[in-house]
Image (spheres, rainbow, N blue to C red):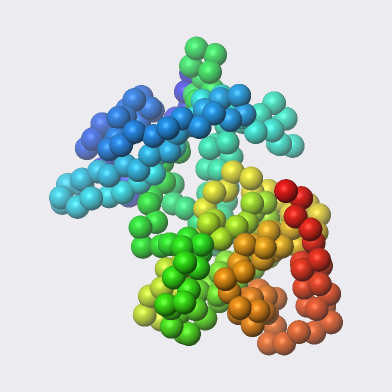
Amino acid sequence: MSESPFIAVNAREVLARHGLDNFEGLWNCRCNASSKRVMRRGGWNTVVRLELEDINGHLQTFYLKRQENQLVRSRLHPLGEPIYAREFRFIQRFAHLGIPSLETAFFAQRRQDGNHQAILLTRALDEYRSLDIWFERWPDLEWQGKQDLIMAAAALVRALHNAGKMHNSLYPKQIFLKLDGDGAGARLIDLEETRRAWFGERDRVRDLSSLHRRTQVATNSQQLRFFLAYMGRSRLDDEARQLLIRILSRRSPE
């Protein structure tokens, strides 16, 4: 038994053109490349890049995620739900809240022969690069480019936390950024672990300390600039200083 799928308006034509506007078509799609199954949570998932030619002869690119029997439990779903169902829900919620993240093209889930299956198709962020890749290029970037990336990343994390949410796995590879002529754009990916910030500042500190531990390429002054931009401050006041101390002193649970 399967539910009616979600299909984005701007993806209907290209998916239908290739017979992929339904669960069966995407589930059985051989796509453009093979993908190794990742075994986790008592089931498996695969992720593969999908390139489809539209009616105008242009390639539209997506990432196709398929999973079976990988469930995550929460207060809303004590018996568990597919991790991609959870991610889809947060992508849609973030869009409503104005927090830039992924763009869903297709989502559906079903039970088949006792197995819980789900498909999540999102548009590829080909104009963006993850923050860890930007860090690899850090020595070659101009000063203004570094500033723009720092400010965009800070604004993104601030929007997330101002909405009362935490990423819960906030590393440079989850922040996607692009440079353009008048600044930088930013988007969050990998929202499977995202949840409400039930514990307020403690949850925000957890996100920020996770990110800080993996941004050592940036100088101390650049990290401070990120923090001030996140706080909406021009300088460290007592409140900001106390929060910064908590971030820097938090030990990794890993």
Q: Residue at x 21, y 47 (%)?
A: 54
**How many numbered tags mark residues here?**
0
Point out residue 204 in the picture as x, y percentages from the top left corner. Answer: 73, 61
Q: Nearer the viewer, residue 156 or 21?
A: 156
Point out residue 217 in the picture as x, y percentages from the top left corner. Answer: 57, 71
Q: Nearer the viewer, residue 149 or 72?
A: 149
Asked whether residue 229 appears in the rendered view, the answer is no
Q: Nearer the viewer, residue 86 or 128?
A: 128
Q: For residue 89, what is the image quadrant?
A: top right
Asked if 113 appears above or below 50 in the picture, the reply is: above
User: Horizontal placement of 21 versus 65: left or right?
Assistant: left
Asked if 253 appears above or below 178 in the picture, the reply is: above
Q: Residue at x 61, y 24 (%)?
A: 42
User: Horizontal placement of 140 versus 227: left or right?
Assistant: left
Point out residue 153 in the picture as x, y percentages from the top left corner. Answer: 56, 69
Q: For residue 208, what is the image quadrant?
A: bottom right
Q: Residue at x 58, y 74 (%)?
A: 218
